[in-house]
Image (cartoon, rainbow, N blue to C red):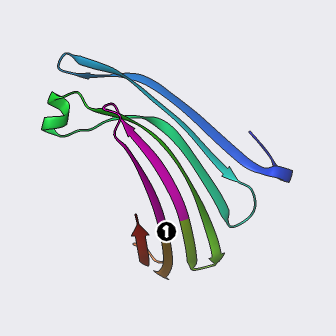
Amino acid sequence: MGNVEHGLFWSALTVGVRDYDGWQTAAWKLQGKWIPADFWRIDLEAGNEVIENIASLNNEVTLNAVSASADWRFSPRWNATLGGAVLRFDDDNQRTRLIGRVEHILARAQPRIVLGLKAWV
């Protein structure tokens, strides 16, 4: 699903049902990855989640999330990422996140060694 002139695009839709000992909830996730040019990648994702800890499972807490990020490999060993997300819980609590990351590949051998700096708000 792509045109080399406009880059390459992949998409996926996942649908299912979660069953937690009598509590059932629909599960869905829509994902897209676009590579508009060499050294660039853009990821988009939307879906719902269940908060998987004992208290949240007992209270049947779910959330809907939408996120987007862009990666730029500006040098053979350097990569930068900028992304954001909006999370909305079923009790109308909403949170937003912004993340930035810069990574440097120290060694390309297996296992690969990467040094990075990450910040989020």
- For the stretch drawn in magenta, the main secondary structure is strand
List the residue tagged with mark 1: 100
Image check: 8 left or right of 106? right
Seen in the image, is 51 located left or right of residue 83? left
Task: Pick out the residue farthest to the top.
Answer: 22
Q: Is residue 97 magenta?
A: yes
Q: Which residues are magenta?
A: 82-100
Rendered residue at 54%/66% (across/down): 81
Q: Residues within 10 Å of mark 1 (few under 14, many from 20)?
A: some
Quadrant placement of the N terminus? top right
Foreground pick, 26 / 84 = 84
Q: Height in image: 94 above or below 17? A: below
The quarter of the picture where the C terminus appears is bottom left
Quadrant hosting residue 110:
bottom left
Q: Secondary structure at mark 1?
A: strand
Q: Position of residue 69 (x, y in %)?
A: 56, 56
Examine the rendering and report whether any part of residue 112 can be seen. no
Residue 86 colored in magenta in the image: yes
Residue drawn at (33%, 31%) of the image: 90
Q: How many marks do you count on the picture?
A: 1
In the image shown, does 3 or 111 lie closer to the viewer?
Answer: 3
Badge 1 amino acid? Gly
Residue nearest the viewer, comparing 71 with 77: 71
Quick one: which residue is furthest to the right in this view? 5
| As drawn, 53 above or below 71 | above
Task: Single out the residue that lies furthest toward the bottom.
Answer: 106
Tell me residue 103's x, y (percent): 49, 76
Question: Which residue is rendered at x = 46% and y = 63% of the image?
Answer: 99
Q: Is residue 40 above or below residue 76?
A: above
